[in-house]
Image (cartoon, rainbow, N blue to C red):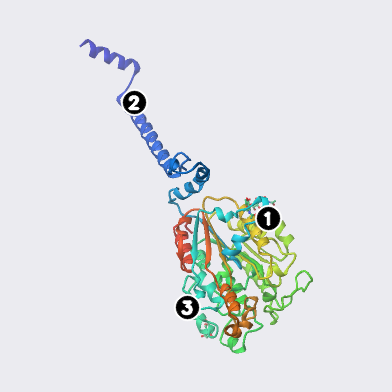
Amino acid sequence: MVTTQQTKEICEIIRLKSTQVFLVAGTCLITVMVTLLCIGFMTRYEVENDVANVADVDYWKDKVATSQKIWYDKGIDELNEALRPQDLTYPKNVRIFVIQGIDGRDWAAFRFPTSDASRGNTNFIWDRFPHLARLKNSCSQQFPCQVASVSRALWLGIPLDKVPDNQQDCGRLFNATQGPISILRQAQLAGLRTGFVTTQRITGPTGAALGNANGNFECDESMPLNSIKSGCQDIAQQLISDETGKFLNVLIGGGRQMLSSLVPNTKYDPVDEMLCESNDGRNLLKDWRNQKLKESKINRIIFDLIQRRDELESLNSSSFDYLMGVMANGDLSGNSKAPSLKLMVDKSLNVLTKYKQGYLLIVEQFIPSGIDKREQLQLLNDTLVNLHKDQDTLTLVLMTNAIYPKPSLDVSEETETISLLPEIFNEAESEIQKRLHQMPSESLLFAQGPKSSIFQGVRKETFLAHAISHVLSRSRVRP
Ligand SMILES: *[C@@H]1O[C@H](CO)[C@@H](O)[C@H](O)[C@H]1NC(C)=O
Ligand SMILES: *[C@@H]1O[C@H](CO)[C@@H](O)[C@H](O)[C@H]1NC(C)=O
Ligand SMILES: *[C@@H]1O[C@H](CO)[C@@H](O)[C@H](O)[C@H]1NC(C)=O
């Protein structure tokens, strides 16, 4: 009786009502639960991200000689990389660097610096990418084959022998039901920002494939009259007036002489006589600007068309929605004042990241024969080293040797070896051997970033488009 009385008194003194007790207890319980959850998450996070140290990675330490052991211990870093658990996230952005004109042999040789032998083997940045796939080149089975078809196989994701050969009858094709579309167009339709940057002319095979342009005529010059009558358009025209081109946030490269009939012919940027030259009086650059002006009356868009390096340098590109850069009459290699790859890539990324809605950027570095390949790889290395480290971005580097010596109807430098083809079977054994060495080799695809692990093994060339379509469809971005 006494105790009950005392309890009652105590309760009255501290005025604890039952609701208050409940509140206090509830708070304590929630705190405990949150703490436990946090600990759980931390532990899981650490298990997933933990990079084992030297002690964790075991090997037959007591079985190898001391002279061997130092090398085995040094190998632990690479082992750790290989043992790292696969990451579960998908990238928000993808940037693909396509290097045309380099194969595995070149790239292995150029790792060694010429001047300073004591520096030994200097690795390129892509040597440190965790994943690598080999893309088969189906052109090897049909050699020689057309570069335009190879580009379409790669970017449309359909096998080389199934790429529609639509040179003749493009008028009918235009009106056909939905044709195949490039990975770039797929990204646009999914609400991503898109960009294409090339050191070649924008109307080259890669530009044509990405822009879903039909036919192989880069400009009006060489187009037969009946093609025009049947409703065909050249690639330059299609890039400016078709949907893919219109939606491209960034388009930078060469090709002024295809886009405009009246171009300045200077010593540092001569008109390239080997390439198509427009002569129908067009100015597609002006057309592009007018198109964007018209759009800007409806949507508030910021855009610019630039044609010189200094214009690009001073551009505050992060505020732009659309950027078109035509930096040479022909390919950029023909213009001694053309901007560097690094400058073009940096400015493009500024435009593409404006709204954080995810992007697909494709950068083509075209290395024509006769150009210092070592220097080009160095430029690529510098460009990649300085890229913003972004956890949301998958970076791919694709190296192809770009030998497809079958002429397209248009004149272009990919065709330079074609005149020799008829003689190919009358040559000395050594010459034939040399030629076989020049066959299109398999491409190497280096991958870094979320889901880079899906790039492994020997794959068909169409795998690239399929894989990009998959990873971007699973990105967290929703239009
Ligand atoms: C590429 O860049 C990395 C990082 O800066 C550097 O260590 C390496 O030496 C470069 N490779 C070459 C071949 O220049
Ligand atoms: C294709 O369609 C356009 C309009 O949609 C038409 O003007 C043109 O004549 C058609 N071309 C052919 C070859 O049918
Ligand atoms: C560049 O543009 C951004 C976004 O519009 C703006 O915030 C920034 O101040 C500009 N920078 C310069 C140097 O004008």
Q: Nearer the viewer, residue 22 or 366?
A: 366
Q: Quadrant of residue 239?
A: bottom right
Badge 3 or badge 1: first in the primary sequence: 3
Q: Nearer the viewer, mark 2 or mark 3?
A: 3
Q: Nearer the viewer, mark 2 or mark 1?
A: 1
State the residue position of label 1: 316
Q: Nearer the viewer, residue 225 or 158?
A: 158
- Residue placed at 47% from the left, 78% from the top? 161
Residue 283 lies, in percent from the top left, at 69, 75
Q: Is residue 228 above or below residue 318?
A: below
Identified by mark 3, the residue type is Asp
Tell me the SS state at disc 1. Answer: loop
- State how far apart marks 2 and 3 are (Cα): 77 Å
Badge 2 or badge 3: first in the primary sequence: 2
- Residue placed at 30% from the left, 17% from the top? 11
Identified by mark 1, the residue type is Asn
State the residue position of label 2: 20
- Residue placed at 57% from the left, 56% from the top? 126
Count of number-bearing discs = 3
Residue 471 lies, in percent from the top left, at 46, 59
Identified by mark 2, the residue type is Gln
The answer to whether one can see residue 195 in this image is no
Quick check: is the Cβ at mark 1 less than 8 Å away from ligand 3? Answer: yes
Residue 94's disc number: none
Quick check: is the Cβ at mark 2 less than 8 Å away from ligand 3? Answer: no
State the residue position of label 3: 161
The answer to whether one can see residue 295 in this image is yes
